[in-house]
Amino acid sequence: MTDVTASGVPEAITTSDGVPLKVSLARATRRQRMQALLLVLPLLLFLLVAFVLPIGEMLFRSVYSPIGPNVLPNFSKVIHEWDGEDLPPEAVFEVFVKDMTEAKKSNEIGKTVGNLATRVNYEIPGSRGLFTKSARKVKNITEGPYKEALIALDKRWENQHIWRTLQRISSNYTASFYLAATDRKYNEDNEIVRADPLYQIYLPILGKTLWLSALITFICLLIAYPVSYLLATLPLRTSNLLMIMVLLPFWTSLLVRTTAWIAMLQTEGIVNNILVFTRVISEESRIQMIYNQTGTIVAMVHILLPFMILPLYSVMKTIPPYYMRAARSLGATGTYSFIKVYFPQTIPGIAAGTLLVFILAIGYYITPALVGGSDGLLISNLIADHIKKTLNWSLGSALGAILLAIVLIFYWIYNKLVGVDNLKFG
Amino acid sequence: MVRFQNVQKSYDGETLVVKDLNLDIATGEFVTMLGPSGSGKTTTLMMLAGFEPATHGEIYLNGNPINNVPPHKRGIGMVFQNYALFPHMSVAENLAFPLAVRGQSKSEQEDRVKKVLEMVELPEFGGRRPAQLSGGQQQRVAVARALVFEPDLVLMDEPLGALDKQLREQMQYEIKHIHESLGVTVVYVTHDQSEALTMSDRVAVFEDGIIQQLSSPEELYERPENSFVAQFIGENNKLRGTVLEVGRDKLATVKLDSGDMVKALAVGVGAKGERTLLSVRPERVAIEPKKTRNTVTLTGKVEELIYLGDHIRTRMSVAGHTDFIVKVPNNAEHHELSEGQTTTVGWQAEDCRALDDMAA
């Protein structure tokens, strides 16, 4: 019905009073759209404040480190001119001594020598004393040659490594926290190398986190699959009861559940007592099942199980029993029917469940902190340590950003393999 | 081919869903189990397929008891109500499934799949997913899958229930045609009587876990053996009364509750004084009939006229029943009736069957 002009291009459709239809439609639905926007506005604001901003802040903090320029403002401007050979020129030393003298007077947070010392100490462990000691005495150096005076103060100022590090941190932005988070550092020649084996902690823990999460996810799947099948196929009364049994722990406090496992698994705990009582093991050989990896795995499987069961159940619920019957009537044994007909149809549920459990597991904190001991710690416990104890927020942020990247990568892989549209969370 | 012997089935141990079922099905026969929902027909089919164990009695297939044979070893093809085509497989994979299970080679499978797709007139659809097919096409694939491994016996559980009327009628003929050309034995379950009458060699009418009548469609319609069958199959007019006597010509004299005396063929009644339900088909009733020896006539008042083109459906009150239906053919000599008019209705005594009175 559209009018076609001589050129063959259809004219834009208009309402009877000549307003283009699209404009008219937009006008007619504007009110509705505004109302819809108002409804989701609180959520959007909340997400912005509670989710987007903190993550942005975290990502920013993992690369932003202004301590160098803050403490040594003038030095940070001139040190760039040094080519990194020998020692910086006399002029740079002069600026450094003056900046240090100024910094010593400051007690503004983020601008003290202590802050600088901590920052350099991240790069060169053990260098902290050099800065605090020199800061106390640097005010005595009032005239040149500053280079000799400073070296006379402490022989370590002769070390090129210190100056290269100072040069590196004189920028507001740094990759050194990501290097630290991946067990790498700059060596004395400003090259990126693996940290000493003794100091390699993050990559092994990250690897262990991924491996334990995968193991926990797999165990969850093994346990959840038959349970979900029963939930989906049993008569309503029985399956409701079973569902309550699945959900009941879900409604219990996480701490209560975790401490319950301590009571169960500790050396004087219920499981060991039963094993001793039934003479499976002797009194002396009680098994250490908690405060190690075993404890972390057992407690986390228990806690994450509902996140596997629910998506699986919701998918299995939609698979009518007649598919299996059809397969059997066509001559397939029960096992063959299951593998060829039932199992493939549950894959969206498996995908959703494993994705959910795996992502939750790699970021899990409380349970490994309580029952993991030192052996069952996960990367999130290290992040928490850096945020709360060592106060190296930037390193914590870098670790967090790496964790976030891993989650996104897994999400991307899943999307490629299964398709996010196919995920069913229940 | 198939034999049910004293088969009983109970799900809860309290009520019997199937009560003492005895049924013989011959090779090549098309037998339909017809009945309202909950009558036990589907349960019977599931027992034959092996998905439900019989609580009592024995089922024989080709003379062998099969109570302890698992479903996949029975070699029975089955078409399900919702087709049960595997959604994650293509049509060809669905059709090849029973062949793969039987260890046939890939080329053999392809041959058979191609052949069977041609049989159901969907030769180009092998690569599609079931969800991409229309209901009727899915139905054909389901039939093809049940037949592709060449079973002797095919069970169909309300296979046309989800289709619209026109497609259903077309599929009825197609299934019938396949049955005739392949010579397989078909056991068909439906609650649609016209489907049962169109397709079957014999129909077993189920109600309350019992086969009420097992006979050819014609027998079933013309000579129902009890009041349930009479009412379930087709339309019929009911008149209640008491038997006064049963003559040697099998004609009973019945005193209707309105006081009228009529004669009817005694089928489900014997003794004098028994309550009876008289059943007469609307098309056998005439308005102002010519009197012959066994004509029964009653007066009736026209309550409602519904014009249906080829006939005029006339609702009358006769002998105290206000839902007495007469189909007046719309031919040249038909009687012009008007609502409120009083006239006589009549039929041959043999066309009126004196059956048991269920409500009594």
Image (spheres, coloured by chain):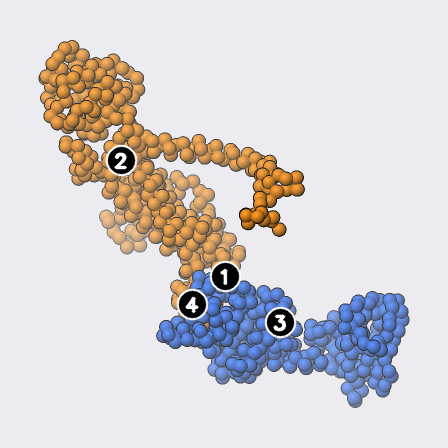
Chain colours: A orange, B blue
Eye-nearest disc, 2 or 3:
3
Same-chain status of marks 4 and 2: no
Q: Which residue is mark 1?
A: B131
Q: Position of residue A134 (x, y in %)?
A: 17, 18
Q: Looking at numbered disc 3 in the image, what kind of residue is underneath it?
A: Glu
Q: Earlier in the sequence, mark 1 or mark 3?
A: 1
Q: Looking at numbered disc 4 in the image, what kind of residue is underneath it?
A: Glu
Relative to A388, is B195 above or below? below
Eye-nearest disc, 1 or 2:
1
Same-chain status of marks 4 and 3: yes
Q: Which residue is mark 2?
A: A178
Q: Which residue is mark 4?
A: B93
Residue depicted at 29% across the width and 31% down the height:
A63
Q: Earlier in the sequence, mark 4 or mark 1?
A: 4
Between marks 4 and 1, how big is the CA–CA gap? Answer: 14 Å
Question: Which of the two residues, A156 or A231, is positioned nearer the viewer here?
Answer: A156
Left or right, A196 with respect to B274, comes to left
Q: Which residue is mark 3?
A: B169
Q: Position of residue A324 (x, y in %)?
A: 46, 65
**In terms of secondary structure, where does tag 3 sit?**
helix
